[in-house]
Amino acid sequence: FSLQISSLLHPLSRLLSSLLCLLPCSSSFCTMTRWRISQKIVVFIVTFVSYALYHSARKAMSGVKSTMTADWMRNDTHEPFFTNEADAKSFLGTLDAAFMAAYAAALFFWGWLGDRLNPKYVIAAGMVGSAITLTLFGALPVWFHMYSIPYYVITYILFGLVQACGWPSEVAIMANWFGAGNRGFIMGLWAACQPVGNIFGSILTGIVLPFGYEDTFVLNSLLIAIGAIVVMTAIDSKPRREERDQREDEEERGVSHSEMEEGEPISMWKALLLPGVLMYCLCNACLKMVNYAFFFWLPMYLTEAYKWDESRADQLAIWYDIGGIIGSVAGGYISDRMGCRSPLIVAMVGCSLGTLFIYSNVGPHLFLNALVMTAVGVTVSGPYNLVVGSVSIDLGSQPCLAGNSQAMCTVSGLIDGSGSVGSALGQLLIPVVQLKFGWQAVFYLFIILNGLACLCILNRAILDIKAMRRRFRPESTPLLVGGDSEDSHED
């Protein structure tokens, strides 16, 4: 069965290898290079799809909130779980907050553990756990009319704990296989797995929802369980010994690589004190609160604000994730060309202040709503993907670590975990603000939070801009003066 799974994933890599064979090269060096590229493609695809399935699974509830609320309040097949919509909506917010709190706490732990275990095993264990807990949460209460507040809270907390297995270990595997060259573009493209998973989850929900909202949870569980088998059979957590030997050959030829050597895992406290980690943790706490507010509440906002049915709202919400893909890929490419990331992140998040304000007033026009929603995705989800992807690897492989590769999971877990703490607080705050002041006030809250995210890394952005000016400023060369100018010796 393992060989069958692997054979399904390797045609693309074999095709690329065949194309590479057309290149004018006959040495063993070229043969190893072709093999290595094909392996990298498999790693990229498998990790991309696996984390997309993680996101699709957690998208299940956000796409059926209105239907779940209606089911909880009806009395034709069971006693009403809630007697009014306000209580049901507050409970949904509590569940989101419980999920994010468990997810945040577990990210710190799984990030720490991922540097001490094989990250592939951590990813697969999280996928299997997600499949079990998602079915327990979303399907069993409907099948057996077993509606209980403690049951819902406990199962969704367990779901949050196992969902956190994915991101730090996925980032560590990508860092093991891909070096610093074009890291922003590669990780920007790869981090698009999050909005791609959201899009897939929304489409899946829209298709399955008419058959019963519990089926969306079951189907997502089945898919992510299959994904766990693929992860275990199709990839390695790091390049094998042959590739390390090949890397040494390439280094002898003058080709530089940034893959780091193994070292001792570091503590969370030491990781937090690494240069730049704390300020990006604070930035992500604000930015992820806004990004996940759209993730959890956008379909319900569209349903309530414009009276669109839930299937249409799920399909329209896809445009936010499409914007996230555009922002992630374009942002990664541009930041590679700039040589730094913080100025671009500040610029994108700064633009989100305007796009959020415009979106809050766009009205029930489908085309305009989708267009502005895409712009919001570019300026909110795009920089978020850069922070938790490219920036996490940059911070986890900075020179002060002296080539220690055993810090990647810990650093990425800290940054994403800090964001999840902020997001958990946001899921408690959003329903309260919405019920008391309306949706418009919620968007003003988003604008304030993104403004704070900019302030957290503004100093870093200013320093990076100054460094860019020194790097790109032409040296002044004396024309008629015999001596060298002072500027001509600047680096």
Image (tube, grey):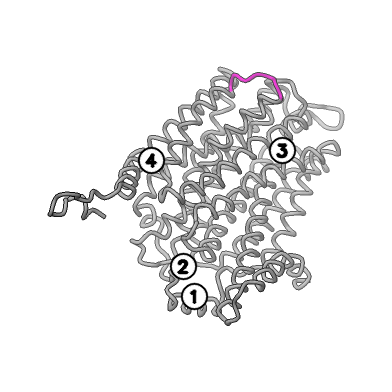
Per the model, the C-alpha gap separating discs 3 and 4 is 43 Å
Residue at numbered disc 3: 148
Q: Which residues are magenta?
A: 360-366
Quadrant in the picture for the C terminus: bottom left
Q: Position of residue 301 (x, y in %)?
A: 66, 26
Q: Position of residue 95 (x, y in %)?
A: 63, 37
Residue at numbered disc 4: 457
For mark 4, does the 10 Å Cα neighbourhood hold few (<14), some (14 to 19), or many (20 or more) residues? many
* Res 247 label: 1
Mark nearer the viewer, 3 or 2: 2
- Indicate which disc, 3 or 4, sits on the residue closer to the N terminus: 3
At label 2, the amino acid type is Glu
Q: Position of residue 451 (x, y in %)?
A: 43, 30
- Indicate which disc, 4 or 2, sits on the residue closer to the N terminus: 2
- Indicate which disc, 4 or 1, sits on the residue closer to the N terminus: 1
In the image, is 322 to the left or to the right of 417? right
At label 4, the amino acid type is Ile
Mark nearer the viewer, 3 or 1: 1
Residue at numbered disc 2: 259
Tell me: residue 423, above or below residue 134: above
For mark 2, does the 10 Å Cα neighbourhood hold few (<14), some (14 to 19), or many (20 or more) residues? some
Mark nearer the viewer, 4 or 2: 2
In terms of secondary structure, where does tag 3 sit? loop
For mark 3, does the 10 Å Cα neighbourhood hold few (<14), some (14 to 19), or many (20 or more) residues? few
Mark nearer the viewer, 3 or 4: 4
Per the model, the C-alpha gap separating discs 3 and 1 is 57 Å
Residue 102 visible in the current orientation: no
At label 3, the amino acid type is Ser
Instruction: Give 28 or 483, whichever is nearer the viewer.
Output: 483
Do the numbered discs 4 and 1 sit on residues whose CB atoms are within 8 Å?
no
